[in-house]
Amino acid sequence: MLLVLHESGLASHASLRHLDTQQLPTCLAISPDNCFVAVGLGTQALLLRYSGFDLQWGITLTVPGFATGANVKFQTCQFAPDSSCLAVSTQRNDPRRSHEDDAVSTYVWSCQPIPGDPTRLWTVQMPTVRASDVPTCPPPNPC
């Protein structure tokens, strides 16, 4: 369950949203105008619109290119300064260590009830460090 509380802390001003058992929150963002809450869920992101403490609408956005949560290593979400759109960056986890492993893809959605397809910004390849790449220190000289 996702519980969103109003700053008053009153239970009557809270909203609940059921999450599937596979959905594990990876990141959270609140828009600068305090009207939107975004929750990254790996292969998806929730975008919730509030007016005061009343939930106006909520949509589930699908992050392209990620089939399962196991494909997600790291995720972050952030709103534009004017709260008009949401950016979600997701780092790929590929256990087979293909050329796509550790790549970070960023998508942007309009903060609308029907946001349309996301805009893909870029993909950045993060350096992968393997255990064999880490230098080992020689043992210290005995005194």
Image (cartoon, rainbow, N blue to C red):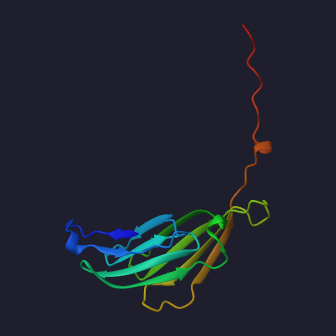
65 and 10: which is toward the camera: 10
Measuring 34% from the left and 74% from the top, which residue is drawn there?
16
Image quadrant holding the C terminus, namely top right
Q: Is residue 24 left or right of residue 48?
A: right
141 and 114: which is toward the camera: 114
Please provide percent x and percent y for residue 3.
34, 69
Q: Is residue 62 left or right of residue 140?
A: left
Q: Is residue 114 left or right of residue 91?
A: left
Measuring 65% from the left and 64% from the top, which residue is drawn there?
70
Q: Is residue 97 left or right of residue 80?
A: right
Please provide percent x and percent y for residue 30.
37, 70
For residue 63, what is the image quadrant? bottom right
Please provide percent x and percent y for residue 31.
37, 74
Marker count (numbered): 0
Measuring 73% from the left and 18% from the top, which residue is drawn there?
140
For residue 35, what is the image quadrant? bottom left
Q: Residue furthest top?
A: 143
119 and 102: which is toward the camera: 102
Q: Is residue 6 above or below residue 60?
A: above
Please provide percent x and percent y for residue 127.
71, 56
